[in-house]
Amino acid sequence: RPAASNNEEPNKKDDESTASQQEENDGGAAAQSQDDGTTIGVRRKKSNLRSKKFPILPCGAFLGVIGFILSLYYRRYGIQMFVDRSFFDLAHSADEWRDIMADKTVVLLGGPHRAGTTILWKTIAAHPDVSGFGTSQETGVDESEGILLQDVYSRHGIGMEDIMSKVKHYENQMLGVGRYALQTEEKVHLTESDPRITRDNLVKILNRFGQYWNMSQPVLIEKSPPTMTMSRFLQAMYHVNDNDGSGDDTKKTESPKVKFVFITRHPIANMMAHENMVGKHSHLTYEVLMRNYIQMHQYLLDDVKDLDNDPLILRLEDFAADPASHLAKIYSWIGIDADDATVREVLDERLGTKIWPDPNKRYRDRWCGKAEKDNMSVHKRNGIVAKFQTAIKDDLA
């Protein structure tokens, strides 16, 4: 029995040793399993991170498109597309401007849109003694029109035509190219009684315009088609600084000399040219365009008798047919060199663009049914003639 007992003791110890070893093995396996799980989790996270990499190619393509669009705007409108134009304003006072403008002549050019204001402006500004505003890239506005540069008086919504044609809110508002003259008279027909005619506002205008003019030139020209409906306002504005502010009229200088030139065009050609520019939008029907044309000419005829320095009115058709003789008359009227050599230099070298002798041809062909496409229907043509011929022939004669 003692021997047996001795044999049982070693067996018991062996069992305990085996159990202990099993526990260690199980624990090691569990630990190993836990480590493996952690490793797998880390691998999964890394895999997820790899799958969520920053989308470089799509973002790069998007930024490339934006950059391309901005570059197109920069090429057209220059740095002032991105910087507030007031940053470049001059800082002269009213008295300083009074001295600067004392010996200047300011030519203000107006007329219906699409009636030749731009080509006439370019030919006058191309004279060696005249300064205009420069290109659209230099000014940051379409066709370098002064009305779009300033913020003293209304721009009549001009420049918003594309937006206006797509937004219902604007459908019945008389704003923008082709219908701004149909606003209420107090909004569009500005005169010398306007309360905005102050020395401070003139200084704002000149400090804005002055950055685009070459102030060393004796003649400065500014072109805005709506000048046709606000000539008396502008004449009074440019003369509001004639005296030194003391109220003593004996100190009036009558400077600068302000001269107005207007250019117009056959109403049918002008109507169709508007349509060609802004597209066939419902808010610019032929009737609206004709009414707008008639109204702005009525304002001009009412105002021209109150303008100083013999205002000049031209027809695009006459100017285009013989630009040399008309330029000579215009230069002489302004008071600058008008000899043949100067006129030829302007037209052949300095102008840099062609003047078409018959600017109405394609519109005349459409009106008369001779164009290859888009001919005016007889019904529509007769309707326009019946409705507006008397007003144009009698009232605007």
Image (cartoon, helix red, strand yellow):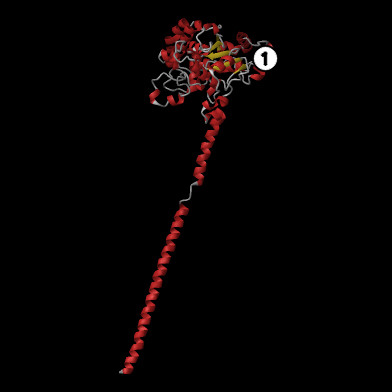
In this rendering, does residue 152 appear at all? yes
How many circles with numbers are drawn on the protein?
1
Horizontally, is 217 left or right of 262 in the view?
right
- 246, 89: nearer the viewer: 246
Displayed quadrant of residue 105:
top right
- 31, 124: nearer the viewer: 31
Most extreme residue toward the left is 1
Please give the name of the residue rendered at 48% of the width and 48% of the height, measured from the top-left corner. 54
Displayed quadrant of residue 72:
top right
What residue is pinned by disc 1?
344
In this rendering, does residue 368 appear at all? no
Q: How far across and down, in percent of the image, does residue 263 sit?
A: 54, 12
Please give the name of the residue rendered at 44% of the width and 26% of the height, measured from the top-left corner. 163
Q: What element carries label 1?
A: helix
Q: How far across and down, in percent of the image, does residue 283 sit?
A: 42, 21
Quadrant in the picture for the N terminus: bottom left
Residue 159 lies, with reference to residue 333, above or below; the image says below
Query: Callout 1: few (<14), some (14-19), or many (20+) C-alpha neighbours within 10 Å?
Result: some
Residue 257 lies, with reference to residue 57, above or below; the image says above
Q: How far across and down, in percent of the image, does residue 166 sit?
A: 42, 27
Most extreme residue toward the right is 341
In the rendered structure, which amino acid carries the disc numbered 1? Arg
- 216, 162: nearer the viewer: 216
Horizontally, is 244 left or right of 174 in the view?
right
Please give the name of the residue rendered at 51% of the width and 46% of the height, measured from the top-left corner. 56
Q: How far across and down, in percent of the image, does residue 10 sit?
A: 36, 88
